[in-house]
Amino acid sequence: LIGITCSKSEDLSEWYQQVILKGEMLEFTDIPGCYIYQPASYRIWEFIQSFFNDRIRKMKVKNCYFPLFITEANLQREKDHIEGFAAEVAWVTEGGKNKLEKRLAVRPTSETAMYSFYSKKIRSHRDLPLKMNQWNNVVRWEFKHPMPFLRSREFLWQEGHTAHMTEEEAGKEVLEILDHYAAIYEDLLAVPVVKGKKTIAEQFPGAHYTTTLEGFIPSVGRGIQAATSHCLGQHFAKMFDITVEDPNQQVKDGQARDKLHVWQNSWGFTTRSIGVMVLIHGDDKGLIIPPRVAEVQVVIVPVGVTAKMADADKQKLYDEVDKLRQTLEDVDIRVECDYREGYNVGYKFNDWEMKGVPLRLEFGPKDAAKGIVTTSRRDQSGSKGEIPVSDIGSEVPKLLEEIQKSMYQKASDEYAAHRKIVRDWADFVPTLNDKNVILVPHCTTEDCEDQIKKDSTGNVEGQEVDVRAPSMGAKSLCIPAEQPEEIKEGTKCVNPKCGKEAVKWVMFGRSY
Ligand SMILES: O=C(C[C@H]1NCCC[C@H]1O)Cn1cnc2c(c1=O)CCCC2
Ligand SMILES: [Mg+2]
């Protein structure tokens, strides 16, 4: 077992691949874009699932499961939903030895699978609001270069689909879900995100509006879409005839009530989140897992065990290590002891560091004599501490919380330091090339965005940039909910070729 043999700052994609493989998070298969989620990453997904299930259960969302396959007829029911995405749909055309009469789509998302059912299930306003969610896999035959967790042909996610009587009830839920998504990132994964709304150019075509969480990968200075919560308006309801009779209408006996189309939302959170967490927290020794989602939060390594040590002494030490473990388990800490014979301490330290275990306790005869354990935080490598054996039951949980908070704070400070306000076009590309995302006064129109994408690909003389960056222009990431300041009357759009009034501060960046 050797450690990571490259540096995050020099070759991010090589570093990323080594870290997730040697950290036993994921394994490649013989199918491009399809990966094995090893227990280390699947456990993180389970932490996310139970956190999110607890919250949506309180919102009366019910989990369910719809078929993997969708008929072509159903998939085509919502035209502008599908036309932009048709190239990404995978199809099944044979069953065993028989060619299928009609090919079946492998679900790329389940709106069209669920909404013909919604049309039947929702008869009256008393059936509203209807709130269903499913944890499943979806397939999108992306052609862009696949990246484990970040962009794969099959991925795991949850997709929530709700139906409401009014636009404002739907709108309230859209934001409530976005807050829960932000809590997954910030409270569990220690990953900062910016909340906002997609511009028309970047929103999901089937949506009335799209709200989004935007992450940031400092190593390459690129944004990354981290989760979405859409209000679909009545768009799909009209396509799928999901209506209720108007309960407020004054009708005479026998007069039929008007039919009202329901207001719908759909929201999704994927295993991309695990890749984002790895990219943000990992270092040149490997993974760093935030304690709240660490399968192993503490590893206790007996030290000072030498070949010439008397068996009785070794056993005594191991018994004391086991008592430490028991004390920590009694306060619900997830702990492992590394009693492996035949591996030296250096090997063991390297192994657990590569797996990203957030806290190591070293315990040897010297520590025992002093009645302390030596602590080593994974997030601040080299920082050692001491905790009296008698206090570990209370001090270790505190230290883990401190690690969790400081991982978040470090990432949040880094994101803030690379989110720059730009008022003049002359600063747009240079600031972008400095591995930043930027906030600019913008008109929020689509053709202006296309222009900016074209005009922001190049290099600037004398500015070294990430070799892949110049080929990529900046796109709008979101209209941040938190606007930096009022846009002053008469402020022009940052794009000199535009000339329109700026209406919002819009966050632009190169992105995954
Ligand atoms: O999936 C959504 C919208 C919505 N789906 C449910 C979860 C939330 C949100 O992602 C958008 N979308 C993205 N990508 C694709 C499709 C698609 O509808 C359909 C065809 C294949 C590719
Ligand atoms: Mg896509």
Image (cartoon, rainbow, N blue to C red):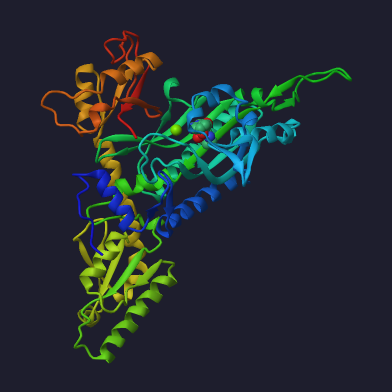
Looking at the image, the residue that sits furthest to the right is 253
As rendered, which of 433 and 507 lies closer to the eye? Answer: 433
Is residue 105 rendered to the left or right of residue 378? right
At horizontal 19% and vertical 18% (from top left) the residue drawn is 426
Q: Nearer the viewer, residue 505 or 398?
A: 505
The furthest residue to the left: 462
User: Extreme front residue here?
Assistant: 97
**As drawn, 177 above or below 52:** above
Dividing the picture into quadrants, the one containing residue 469 is: top left
* Residue drawn at (30%, 28%) of the image: 509
Q: Position of residue 72 (x, y in %)?
A: 62, 31
On the rendered image, what quadrant is the N terminus found in?
bottom left
Q: Is residue 72 left or right of residue 507?
A: right
Q: Is residue 233 above or below residue 36?
A: above
- Observer able to see residue 60: no
Q: Residue at x 35, y 76 (%)?
A: 324
Instruction: Please name whichever residue, 142 or 374, is drawn nearer the observer in this view of the structure.
Output: 142
Residue 507 is left or right of residue 428, and the answer is: right
Residue drawn at the location 25% of the way across and 81% of the way down: 368
Residue 349 found in image quarter: bottom left
Residue 506 visible in the picture:
yes
Where residue 114 appears, as percent x and y from the top left, is 64, 36
Residue 8, relative to residue 24: is it above or below? above
On-image quarter of the C terminus: top left
Residue 222, compared with residue 66, is above or below; it is above
The spot of residue 373 in percent (x, y) is: 26, 73
Q: How many marks?
A: 0
